[in-house]
Image: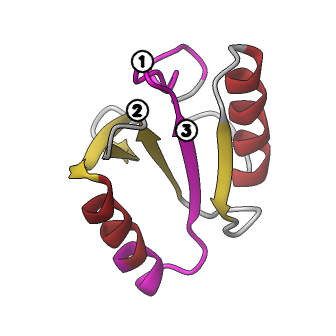
Amino acid sequence: MSGPRLTADFWVAAYLARLRGADIPVFIVARGDATAGAVLVKQSPLDGTATLYQRSFDPMTGAREWMVLTEGAEAEVDAAITRQRSFDPDLWVIEVEDRAGRHLLDEPGLD
């Protein structure tokens, strides 16, 4: 049995605070459902490319981890976000802008 799940808006607020604490610029591009909306994180190193992350769930272990949904030219990543939002309007989209490519998704507590 898994533990209690955080609401999407609570997780997003905590993530934004952690990024801002590390002086990493971050923006909410699209607000999803406050309770159960899925979250996509776009990391842009400000060089015309981007990587889009989504949280994955392993039903066998119950583990959650962030995986790359798509990466490449920023325009292509933005098109992928538009496609995802067309069939999931409850989706959150967070954009992280950091030249070093930091996103902090690999830190404890953000899975």
Give the Cα distance between marks 3 and 1.
11 Å
The x and y percentages for residue 63 are 39, 31
Q: Which amino acid lies under the numbered mark 2 shown in the image of this protein? A: Pro
Residue type (three-letter) at the residue carrying disc 3? Val
Determine which of the numbered discs, if any, sits on residue 100 in the image: 1
Q: Can residue 6 be seen in this view?
A: yes
Task: State the residue position of label 2.
Answer: 45
For label 3, the SS is: strand
Report if the CB atoms under discs 2 and 1 are less than 8 Å apart: yes
Q: Marks 2/3: CA distance?
A: 8 Å
The residue carrying pointer 2 sits among few (fewer than 14), some (14 to 19) or many (20 or more) residues within 10 Å by Cα, namely some
Q: Find the magenta span and give its range.
A: 83-109
Residue 5 in view: no
Q: Which mark is residue 96?
A: 3
Q: Which of marks 2 and 1 is nearer the N terminus?
A: 2
For marks 2 and 3 on the same chain, the one whose residue lies earlier in the sequence: 2
Front of the two marks 2 and 3 = 2
